[in-house]
Amino acid sequence: MQFSSKSGWPRPGVLQETVPTPMNKTGSWRFLTPVFQESNAPCRLACPLESGIPHWLNKVRQGDLQGAWQVMQVYNPFPAITGQVCYRFCEEKCHRASWDEAVAVREVEKAVGLWRHKNYRTDKTGQNGRLKELAGKKVAIVGSGPAGLSCAYYLRQSGAAVTIFEKLPLAGGLLATGIPDYRLPRDILAKELKILEAEGVNFRTGREVGQEISLPELQAQFDAVLLAVGAQQSRRLQVKGEKLPGVSGALEFLGDLHTGRRKAVAGQVVVAGGGNAAVDAACMAKLRGAREVSLLYRRSREEMPAHPEEIEAAAAAGVNFVFETVLQEICGEARVEKVCALHTAPSRRGEPLQVLPETAFELQCDLLIVAAGQESNLPALDPALQNAVQQANKKNPARGSLNLENKLFAAGDALTGPASVAAAIFGGRQAALQLRQALGEQPGTAAPEPSGRTSGFNRGLLPPAETATPDSAAAFSEQFKTRAAVYPGIAPPLQGPQEAIGYDNLNAFLYPKQGRQVATQQEAGRCFSCGTCSRCGVCWVFCPEPAIKQEPDGSFQILLDYCKGCGICAVECPAGVLSMEEVPGHGT
Amino acid sequence: MGRKLLDGNQAAALAVKLARAQVVCAYPITPQTSLVESIAGMWAQGDFSGEYVSVESEYSALAYLIGAAYAGARTFTATSSQGLAYMHELLHWAAGARLPIVMVNANRALGAPWSLEPDHLDSLAQRDTGWIQFYCAAVQEIMDTLLFSFRLAEETRLPCMVIYDGFVLSHTVEVVEPPLQKQADAFLPAPPAKAALQTEQPQNLQAVTSFQYLARVFQERHLDMLQVPRVAKKLTREYAAILGRSYPLVEACGLKEAATVVVAAGSAAQTIKSVLPALNSPEGPTGLLRLRLFRPLPAEEIVSLLARPHIQRVVVVDRDLSAGLGGIFAQELRALLQGSPFEGKICELNLAGGVDLTPQLLRRGLKAAAAGGGEQGRIIWGVDL
């Protein structure tokens, strides 16, 4: 054995070569064989985008933000946005939480996104390494929310000419009008839109499909159309006085504030509803000057459909929560003056609501914001579309996007109803995948997902060609081609049974909880790489035989000629990618 | 030298280097392998001043060292499991000849069946060979104890075995602070130059003898063994004065108020120590007694530490089994505490086969002991919990 370090201490990563005793092939003792198998990390399964989180975290850990972006954008082209607004579904499921504290995935994601914003360049050719698969194809996307933008990004990367139609004068959909600006600073959105424009996405704002241009006209002019129109149709409360001035839907209220149609809020505000839109509206009302904001929800805080993160933010902003309460009537002469409400008996979501008639009370109200849920904008565009969605759904349930008819697709909230930004981006990505197929892209360029078995650990990480020096547009372009050849430009959705890899929390007691205030690279280094080989070399350290071999590129091989099958590698592998399996013919 | 990240085997190898061992002879065996590899690696790079000798078996390794020790050399070997068993005959010889050989044993279960689990029976089966035995609980302790053992062995002229759990300590990296060479030299002077065997004066050593003489040899060895705790305490003070670290022969934790005392050796004790505050039961707090020196058994220390009226129960954790009797540590404790208030109150939690002692398992074991299990003949089996 040779060690390259001066002191002669063996350490993983510095082992130059392993020289087993060639004659002594102890592999013949083996009746259990280590098997390399990557599994699903719980964060990835929790992520609406099914993002390969351990992969890009590993790139960040290596200090390679360019590489991290390359991996990231396969799943999510807008990490700067999701890094601000995502509800951290991944962190809820992070195995590291059982050890000390979940990895701050969203913070790292944001850092990757901001790196991209800072380092984005267009190269001399203006092509930026885009592929030519869909060159000459024209796609219209209706709606410029996260689903539409995401689809535009991926189609543009495939070389299609993309035009986005937006009925409002500003692009971004809910990102621009719905999500409070304290959650998503608008300069981040602006930068994202600017990059898309630089990539050649054509924005036509203030053009409402159905008004300025009809859907059939679009279909005639473009090779394909994606409807990513969102779900902004506010449901009604069905109580008396709902038509009075001073009553507003939550999204209308938020839209008015963000587009400048409403400058400030004053007086007593009542919000009815318990979802994210209700909480966002309540928060914004409070922040924009309302004297007092009361949020009425028919069940308890625990039952609120809004994300706990939002609820906490609202409580911190000073929103007054009134639980187990329903609106009975909205009163006022020329405009809303007060609301009458009733308490309800405690109930869980899904259970019938029992109103307590003797508990009526009144609340002064200058502005009532109704947030009783939203519905898809598709029926408003064309009532037949809802029917088409139902029909298509019956045939093949939608996962993010749906092929409605020939070259007509739908994706995002318009399809699923109000979900999350991440889910909408996933929908756009899915639509791009479907569109790419429908527009005749040659199948077979997509590499398989990292699953299945090999005798080596090579598949744990993306190939070395992924690592690059940032700032170089040419390198970026070259990289992109390499990447496109080995990795799907658009990640296909996960297939088959989706079980997360387990985690046996043995030693949590040894380590105190850690604070979160750490550098991005360090934080990424906290990832356990669950289910994904991170080439940490622990298998090599523990293998009692020369049966684990490190290749010059850092990957590992199992030399079965020398593996006695003791299983220590499988016990010790912190990522859980090794398991022991019985081999027919041995020990039987 | 500053702080380093080392695993148990690397720490042991570094201690052997710092001790300026003159002859190292060993045969590789899992989980000891990386220890001798490290020494061989240092030797190949010119970083190790002693001789490294490769032989074809553990038997030859110890035989070689016996010769080297007769010639007055400071000697070291390391092994595990079957390798130690293979040395058995010569272990007796080294002790009988009063050769201060130092060895490491990284615990590993004896076959059959073939296994790599950290069962303690390999070293406990050598309990009666006349070697001093230390059981370590952490990587830093391995390094310190090994350096310490060379001096202890040479002062008492008794061979010394430094023992730690295979993989759990041999392959697990911890932060350690290696002594500087000058500190090691200050504690451990050069080995005595006088050799038993001299080429100019050929002799026949340990030749055939009568029972009268043999009885005196055995008696003397026993009496010298009994002096080990006293010598070790003196040397511990010296070590602490130079390096600022010291380890008791029996480590006590939280005994001042404990209602239940867990007795354990090796890395399991470290696990128990780290969860002690979380182990308080309705009966009261739980304490730990860690057996670090096992041969000779520091009887006085154990008895005086347990002589507290609030201690209701003693639970001995054994990762070994003398088939037909039970765990060896439990039996030693029962013999030692015969006639004390603990008679009949010493429970045994048995992890033979290398069962990993997790906090959950420990809790279940303590619950079973509180429910009246684990007394003589009623072992609480870790594998059943």
Image (cartoon, helix red, strand yellow):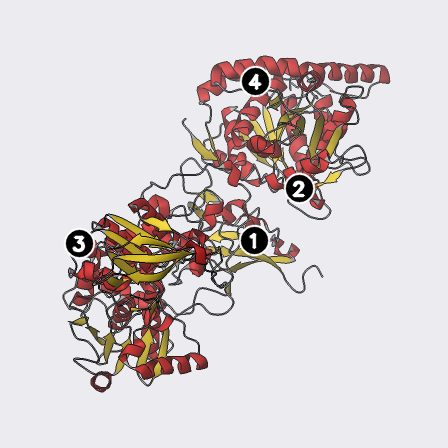
Residue A166 coordinates in the image, percent (x, y): 20, 72
Residue underneath mark 3: A264
Do discs 3 and 1 share a chain?
yes
Q: Is residue B15 above or below residue A472?
A: above
Residue sitting nearer the eye, A99 or A465:
A99
Do discs 1 and 2 share a chain?
no
Please identify the residue farthest to the right as the structure is shown: B211
Residue underneath mark 4: B191
- Marks 2/4: CA–CA distance: 38 Å
- Marks 3/4: CA–CA distance: 88 Å
Mark 2 or mark 4: name the one nearer the start of the chain: 4
- Marks 4/1: CA–CA distance: 40 Å
Q: The disc labelled 3 sits on which kind of residue?
A: Ala
Of tags 2 and 3, the one toward the viewer is 3
Label 4 chain ID: B
Question: Quick one: label 3, few (<14), some, or many (20+) residues within 10 Å?
Answer: some
Label 3 chain ID: A
The local secondary structure at tag 4 comes to: loop
Label 1 chain ID: A
Residue sitting nearer the eye, A502 or A384:
A384
Q: The disc labelled 1 sits on which kind of residue?
A: Pro
Residue underneath mark 2: B354
The reply to whether discs 2 and 3 touch (Cβ–Cβ < 8 Å) is no
The local secondary structure at tag 3 comes to: loop
Q: Which mark identifies residue A22?
A: 1
Q: Is residue A337 above or below residue B321?
A: below
